[in-house]
Image: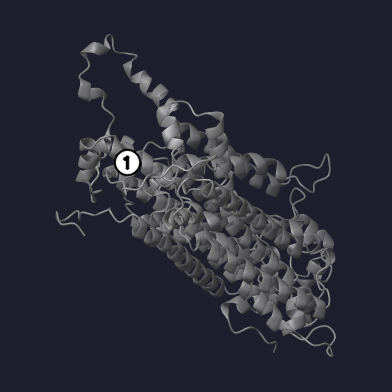
Amino acid sequence: MRASLPTAAGLLLALLVSSGSSAAASPSIAARDPFTATLADRALWTRDGDHGHGGGHGHGHNPHAQPIIVLNETEIAMSHEPTPPSYYSFDWEGEGDLTAKRHPGLMMAHIVFMSLAFFGALPIGIILRSVRHPAHGVSMLAFYGLAALGVSSAGLYKKMTPNMYQGSVHGKQGYFFLFVALCLSAVDIVAGVTRLVTFFKSDTKTVRQFWRYVILNQADDVQLQGPEYTGLIVEDPEEYEIAKLGRNSHDSSELADGTEQWANEVHRHQSRGSTVSERTLFGNHRSHSSDTLNEATKQGPMTPKAWAKWIGQTAFAIVERTLVVAGFAMVLTGIVVYTGGCRQNWVNGCLAHLIKGGIFWCYGLLTFARFLGSFAELGWAWNRAPSESKYSAEWTESFVIFLYGITNTWMERFGAAPGDPFTTKQVQHISIAVMFWFAGLVGMGIESKRVRRWLASSTFSSVASTSNIPRDAVTEPPSYLASFNPFPALVIGVTGAAMAAHFQTYLFQVEIHRLWGNLLVAFSVLRCFTYFFLWLGPPKSILPSRPPTEALGSFFLACGGLVFMFSTEEVTIAAMRRGRDDVMMFLNVAVAITCLAFCWTLCMVATKGYLKSRSHTSVTFRSSNTSETA
């Protein structure tokens, strides 16, 4: 009996482990195999030149054929070379030189340190930056310290262990992402030095000014001499929206009838003069900069300098947050390299499942973050936007769907020779990509305010004179307060339904595809329920409404993406070889990992909210049931 790790991570490694070395230990499978048809018989099974995922092992694509229950090692060996031993089999299963010393502890240390760096210190650092907390530098030092420990442990492991994965680029990718992080930190250092020089050029120098301007990067009431720093130090997007909300606070009185109330805003901004006009909604201090984006747009067209600053800040924020996603990508490539997967002609199917499943996984986590209240300043948290937002969440979802479709349409023919006919599988996948393409376009069109005005203009084409129409008759209905765009949910639901019916050679593969397909369908149904309930009562408060259907839907979406990644042909065959072809086990592992990721998401969003609540203490809440403030 082979040893296995006693943890969930070890179980996943066992599922993903290379299957080639196990083939020799399973001669009884071929002996029991009832699938003993001749090559001529198998040719009758083949349809339109189809093959399994990623140039699979030659099983035909006949939707009328019954899936096979027992693994056919003979046919797999006809199209796949035996997979060499992996780091996992070397460390935990005793393959390779029996006299060589194993060092699995170093690999475990590498996993722990890099996970703490990319999913602990890095996101905390991003959060601390968004609230301008002085501990931001400490968190980034912790990130680099943990990353250094992780890189060191991996380097020692590689020196003491034979190379079990030729051509691996996992290490090079990791160094590249660390280099990007260092570049962002270099911008921080240059900005800090610039602020320090500006501070020493000022007329008055106090400890308070040094702390606020140099350390916190907050403009103080005392004007500093010298050019103000306008580099790429990122402010969280909601800070711009909060400033705009403070200037337009007279519009917020309509929202006071909702579930919450923003205290001390209406009378303060309406009754006091220009002194208060420089204050933000949350306190008496001035905004971080006297030429913020909103102030520039308020005064008139943005200057080239303001545009350059906005572009730099946006690019900085995107790259910094992308590093967390890059950490997730490194987890996937690390598992692949350590378990010896995705080699030879398994690579195409492996990449397809990991990339597409990873997209659904990240989409699910972002949807859960929206449920918790992220992006509320844009109106994306199922709330009424505090200020006008140019792009809705549904527009963004539709754009991503469109971008995926227009690129993936042409990628389905990768590996096909010129002049080869389109196979049934290629037609299936290209059709799904085309659906993404044009359904995304429809979704973006529906979200366009200009298109909506065009559609509404047809109402007046049959009216002789608009002067006779009552004013309240042309008032926007309450449903215009929110976006009700079902096309992103429709695309994901149809994709799930189609993949649940996808032909597979083995019954276990059919069950796994049906599982994650149904999970995607469940998300689609729950998103439609969200729209239904919000249609009955559109959000009136600027605070997140948190519809429970979104909590459930986001979980099904993330879990479905994870099972999608588990359903690669190589993983399912490895599971069958090891007697782990159990759908419940796959589902339970996916649910456990999804719960862990949701807990991490909750901690990150709650940490950011806690820090903001400490810096913005003038916000009070009124219960929707009573008039008392909490």
The quadrant holding residue 307 is top right
Which residue is found at the position 29% from the left and 35% from the top? 274
Q: Nearer the viewer, residue 12 or 439?
A: 12
204 or 232, nearer to the observer: 204
How many marks overall? Answer: 1
The quadrant in which the N terminus is found is bottom right
Residue 304 in the image: state x and y as whole percent: 56, 29
Residue appearing at x 27%, y 13% in the figure? 466
Q: Nearer the viewer, residue 146 or 555?
A: 146
* Residue depicted at x 60% and y 76%: 9
225 vs 106: above or below: above
Question: Can the viewer see residue 616?
Answer: yes
Disc 1 marks which residue?
246
Which residue does the image show at 45% across and 61% down from the upper left? Answer: 555
Mark 1 belongs to which amino acid? Gly
Quadrant in which the C terminus appears: bottom left
> Under tag 1, what secondary structure?
helix
Residue 622 lies, in percent from the top left, at 20, 54
Left or right side of 342 for 245? left
Q: Where's residue 389, x and y in %?
A: 41, 37
